Amino acid sequence: MKPLDCDLKQYEACLAIRDFWDDCGHEWTYKTLDEKLVILGGFVQRGGSLKRVIKRYAEERSEIYRCRIHWVIFTYIWRMIMVDEPMSDFNPMSRRIKCLENDELIKLLSEELKKCVKETCGTRYDRSGKHEVYNYWIVSNEYQYDDSALDKIERKHWRSNPDEPFGSYLFKAERWDWMKCLF
């Protein structure tokens, strides 16, 4: 796996499609979750804006397609922070993520991609027995349960909104159940 090899404008166009933002469409199955994260991570690490990609995708879609965006972002974040932990509404991390505003959610995804998607190297042998070193990209599990990026975003939110009642903030997680489309 490796990120796309193109300029950022073309890269952005390649990401603003259902393959990356609609987990109910058949296009979702074209790539594994880790392949998508590597491609998204390469984009973010090169300075690309996921906010612009998602805005571009959402502008060209009806609500029936946009309603899956926040769930897909949640899935991506969950894979990087919680790794193999099953998704559950009873997990405190789930509720914390769901309390974020859309921009904060995208920021968290970007920060996790910068941290977790890495280039590494391996050795392989050809048929004659000679080995070669090659580079490939992975989604690292070394940051499992690391909520430092989420903490930073939450602290910034509280500094920016000091008058927001804590109960109102926690109630934002309920939007995911009763609002069909957040984007």
Image (cartoon, rainbow, N blue to C red):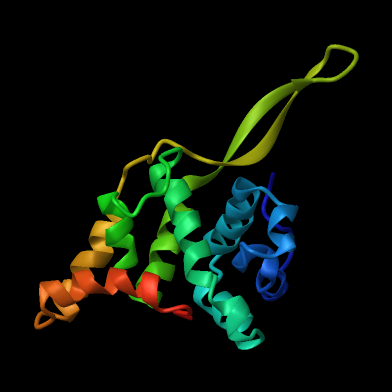
Residue 50, above or below 111: below
Residue 100 appears in view:
no
Outermost residue on the top side: it is 129
Residue displayed at 62% across by 67% down = 22
* 53 vs 114, nearest the viewer: 53
Picture quarter containing residue 126? top right
Q: Toward the viewer: 164 or 155? A: 164
Q: Quadrant of residue 26?
A: bottom right
For the view shown, which residue lies furthest in the right direction? 128
In percent of width and height, residue 176 lies at: 38, 70
Q: Tell me the quarter of the image containing the N terminus.
A: top right
Q: Position of residue 115 (x, y in %)?
A: 43, 50
Q: Nearer the viewer, residue 167 or 132?
A: 167
- Side of 80 relative to 13 (left or right): left
- Write the residue at 13% across / 81% down: 164
Instruction: Specify whether 75 is left or right of 161.
Output: right
Q: Residue furthest front?
A: 178
| Residue 119, percent from left and from top | 58, 42
Quadrant location of residue 134?
top right
Q: Is residue 15 visible?
A: yes
Q: Residue visible at 44% across and 61% down?
A: 109
Q: How many labels were placed on the picture?
A: 0
Report the side of 60 relative to 138 (left or right): right
Q: Position of residue 60 (x, y in %)?
A: 66, 86
Residue at 41% over, 48% down: 87
